[in-house]
Image (spheres, grey):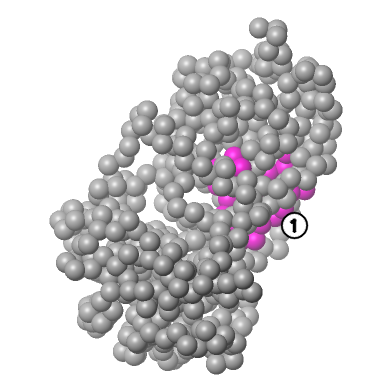
Amino acid sequence: MVGAGVPAETLRLSAMTQTAEQDQVTFPGARAPDRQHWVDVGGLRLRVHEWGDEAGRPLMLAHGGFDFARTYDVFAPLLADAGWRVVSWDHRGHGDSEHAELYSWDADVRDALAVFDATTYEPVPVVAHSKGGNMLLQLCEIAPHRLWRFVNIDGMPSPMRHMEIMGHERTRMMEMAMRDWLTHRRKIADLTRKPGTLDELAKRRGRMNPRLSHEWLRYLVTVGARQDEDGWRWKIDPALRFGGFGPWRHSWSLGTLQAVPVPLLGILGLQHEEMGWGTEPGQLEPFLPPDARVEYFEDAGHFVHIEKPREVADLILDFLS
Amino acid sequence: MISLLSGRVTLALHELRGATNGARPLLHLHGLGLQSPASMPKELEAWTGPVYAIDFTGHGSSTIPRGGGYTPETLIGDVDAAIEHIGSDVTLIGRGLGAYVALLTAGARADAVKGAILCDGPGIGGGGPVPGTPTVVRVDEHAPVPPDPYALAELSKDVRPADYAVDFARLAANANRNPFAIVARARPPWLEAVADEVGAVPTTLADALRTFSRSPGDH
């Protein structure tokens, strides 16, 4: 059975080796996980990070695509300090989890359930951002009895994206996407992340996260990149890339929202960003179940929990109380 | 056996019949859970050119990945790796799952794939045209391999919308005349839709092999 019967190797962070440059970079409020361990899924190891009292009630925290669990180093401790055992994990190919031979949406959802299984079989509250939010939306259908509350931070399918591209235009876009994907795939075996200084990596990430401060991005480099002899490299698998093609339709995900079986809180920053879903107030509500609500932050973007960690954490803690 | 790289997977390509001067190559794509034939199949003897077969990822002598993650789209990459080795003007013959992958590849690599012969076999239906109630695939990790139990589970439930299949059929038909020979008797929704497209010809295996194996000068 996936995720079961595998001894979890627990490592204390204090035992981990840190470089001098890592030691010098701090960020106000950022706190390393209290515990880390591995979960094995069919021979692939996923890194799990936990904040808070090990005896506390578990709360599952899922990151978005091209992120990693340590992007919660400020946000997770705010939930942990309220008594929750906050459990997050690096998706396959992300953060400290192993790079896989194959990636798929269903594999990511299976990996998530393996981390749930390794944590508890009791219903748990779930807080999930972006791609993580969409993944756990699927988990609501697969294992509704495993969730107690669901907080989705800009990870619900956007009704704007619901407008499917039709006909010749779709065929043409698919042709381009396939050509790019095949070109990329032929190079995967030789791909490595481009090395750079700590500042260069922070600037590069700033292109995807334009609203986040350089100081925060510098901190992320120290927890999301590794320091090789020729410089820092992001740990994320270079085989992963944005875009792609496949049979999935946004309308299928949108149709699942009504079936969310637990109280649902949506949180959205209204400042549009490339990484965001572009949802406007009022667009999502017609698709939500009756006991769901959405809270909007006017002056924040897709990473609202990083821009306003205290406010978002308070909103969630109130929802869970 | 020839070893090729398909992403991070080492793929097994088998040469069932050696190269013949000027004759077009045929590439065999097996059904779900199977592998390349051990020797030249009798029913393909009518093909005049070289004949190859691959073991898809997780099958036969190809790598078994850790933790699954299979999609038919990934298998396009397997066929693409084989085409890079064999060269262009190739005809695909796919059975079951291999027929669906042959369709996808004929559209994705219309510049290199002359056409595809779509035959019955395991895995021809996939998970149907729309998603059913989602499940998480659990497998017996102690089951003997190959085939990879994740491949068996995941590649039998992937969604195959008819209009998605038609997109690939049209990409192939834009580049090649009558690119699809439909030999299969089974008609899952994706194949039913492709059969209605211009460029799809219902036929017998013998006729399909005869038609596709003609060299360009024969037309």
Query: Is residue B147 among what the camera can see?
Result: no
Measured as percent of width and height from the top left, residue A48 is found at 51, 77
Position of residue B13 relative to residue A206, above or below, is above
Position of residue A182 relative to residue A257, above or below, is above
Mark 1 — residue? B144
Q: Is residue B56 magenta?
A: yes
Secondary structure mostly seen in the magenta stretch: loop
Q: Is residue B57 magenta?
A: yes
The residue that appears at 51% across and 39% down in the rendered structure is A178
Quarter assignment of residue A167: top left
What stretch of residues is rendered in magenta? Answer: B54-77
Position of residue B144 relative to residue B38, above or below, is below
- Pick the residue in front: A117 or A132: A132
Measured as percent of width and height from the top left, residue A296 is found at 18, 66
The residue that appears at 33% across and 74% down in the rendered structure is A213
Please state if B212 lies on the left or on the right of A20 as rendered: right
The residue that appears at 41% across and 51% down in the rendered structure is B133
Say which amino acid is labelled 1: Pro
The residue that appears at 76% across and 18% down in the rendered structure is B23
Please state if A298 lies on the left or on the right of A156 as rendered: left
Please state if B177 lies on the left or on the right of B122 as rendered: left
Subunit ID for the residue under disc 1:
B
Measured as percent of width and height from the top left, residue A12 is found at 55, 90
Query: Is residue A321 among what the camera can see?
Result: yes
Q: Quadrant of the C terminus of chain B?
A: top right
Quarter assignment of residue A83: bottom left
- Pick the residue in front: B109 or A129: B109
Q: Quadrant of the N terminus of chain B?
A: top right
